[in-house]
Amino acid sequence: MDLLRLAPLRQFLRSRWYPTSFQVLTVGFLGLLLAFAFLGPDRGGRNLATVVTWTLWWPLLPISLVLLGRAWCAICPLAAIASVAQRLAPPVRQRVPPLVRRNGIWVMAFAFAGLTWIDRVSGITSAPRTTGIVLSLLLVGAVGASLAFQRRVWCRYLCPLGALSGLYAMAAPLALRPRRAECHQCAGKDCYNGSARASGCPLLEFPGNLDSNRNCNLCAQCLKACPAGTPAAPGAMELRLRMPGTELASLRHPLVGEAALALLMVALVYIQTVDMTAAWPQYMKWLLESSPAMGYALAFTGTLALTLLATLGTYAAAARLARGPGESTSQSFAAYGYAYLPIALAGHLGHNLSHLLYEGPRAVQTTLDELRIPLALVPPMDEGAAMTGINWPALLVVSLGIAGAVLTVWRVAGSRGQPLRRAWPHLALVGLWSLVYLTVFLLPMNPRHSH
């Protein structure tokens, strides 16, 4: 189904109101968050910046990526401010260096892992001032990259959330794709180069060859620049509805870096989740008592490093066992890594869903209180109380993710022939991670601002 055949939606996406109207709102809210971060209360659970950023926006982000692809990247306030700075600055900008193009995925992967480490060591989610500093540094990075390079190099190659957003967007049911026949007849390539109607693709992707959601932020610039598009005709692009997750098993160009990031996300989501359960303090107490010279930061760093290395090591072994005749280990590594993304994504959604359902109403009330809006929607809640009982919504989401991972492994193996022979190492590893995730989500979890 092509949603661009719906005239109201097509006209809105091609209008000047999209995505500008959303960008104005997000930029204004970013300014408000920064003001509260540096001038508001020091207590994380009572500060608008930490409550909105970590209790509302952060849980909602992966949900938006799963439903709408990288649409958030089109209205991101950091990118919007960077784009304005780029237009106002003198047009002397460099092309993307080959080193950045080749290694951007690794930069983003390790930047996200670094943010996870900083959060668990310094407690960003409970520290308004630290939250403000992190947001400010990200803004400086986005503006600096826009002044140094063409278009949105920050979003494509450097943003800590860029690679993660691209991976999660691959599972979305929404996909912007070209009509091959119309695109092959076009000689101008305005969708990439830009024209008087609109600028070219900000993520440096040629829409005529678009076959993945990884580098499409649904900004609609290609729709506006396309000479074949009119208010009465869809043009050379179509906005498809598809079965979620189908792209993960049919990628034409799987990347080793993205596959590694998918595996890193499996481990990082596990660490982020188990860190907030009642079992984590007992584990850390045992570890610190066993090594008196070791502080919390070193103990956590060692645990995180060992978890990441064990995850990549066991996966590399599975990829080696699953490779076929004439296939290198790196090719097998790249092909099967995306199959683990449903587990990481489901765990991420389940983790954040737990906080959103438990802490979300209180976060909304805190937001109203901080903005001096006299509405009492939620009674007071003990911020330190753990979330007790079986978390059925999270367990359901994780179970769906496990099923998605098994199905994707089987499809990838089937596309290479002899599916059972090639799939069993990964099916065994998926089964192991399934047991780990289900066990962790059965444990009581602490609120975000009390751990």
Image (cartoon, rainbow, N blue to C red):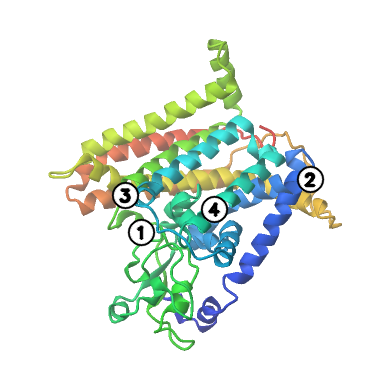
Q: Earlier in the sequence, mark 2 or mark 1?
A: 2
Question: Farthest residue in the right direction?
Answer: 374
Q: Earlier in the sequence, mark 2 or mark 4?
A: 2
In the rendered image, which residue does mark 1 sit on? 246
Q: Split into 4 quadrants, where in the image is the C terminus?
A: top right
Residue at x 73% of width, y 55% of height = 32
Residue at x 60% of width, y 49% of height = 58
3 vs 2, front mark: 2
The amino acid pointed to by label 2 is: Leu
> How far apart are the two marked residues, 2 and 4, measured between alpha carbons?
25 Å
Residue at x 43% of width, y 34% of height = 435
Q: Is residue 120 above or below residue 37?
A: above
Q: Is residue 274 left or right of residue 428?
A: right
Residue 335 numbered tag: none
SS assignment at label 2: helix
Please indicate, yes or no, whether residue 319 appears anywhere in the rendered image: yes
> How far apart are the two marked residues, 1 and 4, measured between alpha carbons?
36 Å
> How far apart are the two marked residues, 3 and 2, measured between alpha carbons?
44 Å
In the rendered image, which residue does mark 4 sit on? 144
Q: Earlier in the sequence, mark 3 or mark 4?
A: 4
In the rendered image, which residue does mark 2 sit on? 39
SS assignment at label 4: helix
2 vs 1, front mark: 2
